[in-house]
Amino acid sequence: MTSFEPTKKIVANLIDPEEIRIAILDDRGKLYDFFVERMLEHQRTGEIYKARVDSVLPGMHSAFLNLGDGRNGFLYLDDVHGIDVKPGIEMLVQVVKNARKGKGARVSPRISLAGRYMVLIPDGHETGVSKRIEDNDERARLRSISKEIRPEGFGIIIRTVAEGFDKESLENDVQDLLAQWETIKRNAEKNGAPCLIHRDLGLLERVLRDDLTEDIDEIVVDTEEDRDNIQSFAERFFPGKNIEINFYKGKTPIFDVYNIENQLLELQDRKVWLSSGAYLVIDQTEALTVIDVNTGKFVGSKNLKDTIFKTNMEAAEEIARQLRLRAIGGIIVVDFIDMDTEESNQELIHELQELFRNDRCKARVYGVTGLGLVEITRKRARTDIRAALSHGCPFCGGLGWVPREESIALQIKRFIRKITMSSRSEALLIEAYSSIAAYIAETFLASWEEEFDKKIFIRGCPEFSWGKFRLDAQGSQVQIEHRINSLQKREGWAIVHKSSSA
């Protein structure tokens, strides 16, 4: 990699076990990709279950499977070969689409195990190479190696990151995946259905496996243990590359230092401003996503035709970025500003196709329709950011969106961490909206007190807006309890939550 090539940086916020967040920044410090995973989430892509068929729906040509954790998995019968699917039978299945929006995960009996350089498919026979490797000589070399190292009774698909690596590296990957498969089979034999048999790598390991490429020159984490683990991973897979791996131990939260928190807030807005002064409006529905392009404050410098063309081309680049960052999949309809010539339309479509060429989630761009719209389809690979971080507003019957309780709880936890790092107070009194306070008290309060070694009281305030919170007081436990008593006397009541140890 030459010195003038753009580089990227991985920033990992791992200090809170309830929520892991990883950002990839480009050389300008702008978000390039973002991943989030919560401790309480279940049925994630890659997990393997020993499931029991709960019901079969011939009219939908599908079945529901009991996975053992509350929500049934959904199985298309077209995915099943050689098995008579009927209620009560047990099957080994893998999650191929995350559980989302109150629905269980989509599962398949076709198992695939992803390694660093390849995907191993038990009971498969294919030998494939990622289409994103475009050099024909390299494709032929990798295909030849894969035929030599493919175990009997398994299929192999070579991943994009294998480009340029030798046979020994790929062979070691095969052996690791074969050992993993043997463990999965043993666990399936020992355990009865329904149960989880195999959990895929954690978020940090998956990001390192899939996104630690030649253009990453620095990784920053806020936990020392993970810094050491990443160092071992980098030395194993990039022995000749000097990746700077740093442990951040400052008092300001790591995502604030790199201005990631502000960028995440922007990522949840409907309106996205472009550098020229034009803007996008992004509306997500159950069936599709609609994006509208507007010139906004951009007036151009030549003529109207040139202004419209420049706005559309700038919008195309930002649309590709927003779809990746927001993890939006399915059908996307874009209302670009109308252009007069077919040549301009074709240039715009070509630009979009180039922008999506290296998108890990396969995307297809269709031409301009008779209504002047551009249609895009993009594979859904993970839960989109809006669904991950928010839900329907409880005050307006779901017509609007508010942050999830977990999201606000973790904001409050990060707020508490800031306070504890600059104060020696024994106890804190935090105020938040009533249901948020109750949720924190029930789910997190005891563990937070243990982690921060402080007494934490949460006061529910029905007059607060949904996401509002603040520090009311800090000091000794006696001082905080006195403050609570005075609030109760003054207001006649005050719902204050505390842990059982308080």
Image: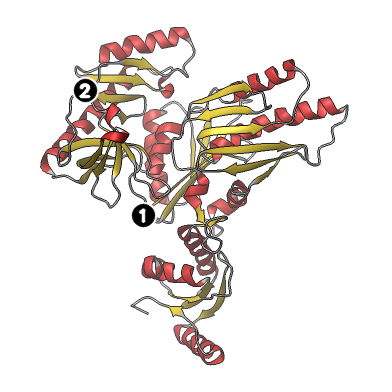
Q: Residue 501: percent from the left, percent from the top?
A: 34, 78
The label shown at residue 40 is 1
Q: Quadrant of the N terminus?
A: top right
Q: Residues within 10 Å of mark 1 (few under 14, many from 20)?
A: few
- Residue lying furthest left: 190
- State the residue in front, 158 or 364: 364
* Image colouring: secondary structure
Q: Please give the residue where the numbered disc 2 appears in the rendered image.
A: 123
Q: Is residue 442 left or right of residue 327?
A: left
Element on which disc 2 rests:
loop
Q: Residue 114: percent from the left, percent from the top?
A: 33, 30
Amino acid tagged 2: Asp
Q: Residue 474: percent from the left, percent from the top?
A: 53, 78
Picture residue at 66% right of the left edge, 30% below the top: 316
Q: Is residue 229 above or below residue 85?
A: below
Q: Is residue 129 visible?
A: yes
Q: Is residue 449 above or below residue 47?
A: below
The label shown at residue 2 is none
- Residue lying furthest right: 302
- State the residue in front, 13 or 314: 314
- State the residue in front, 295 or 113: 295
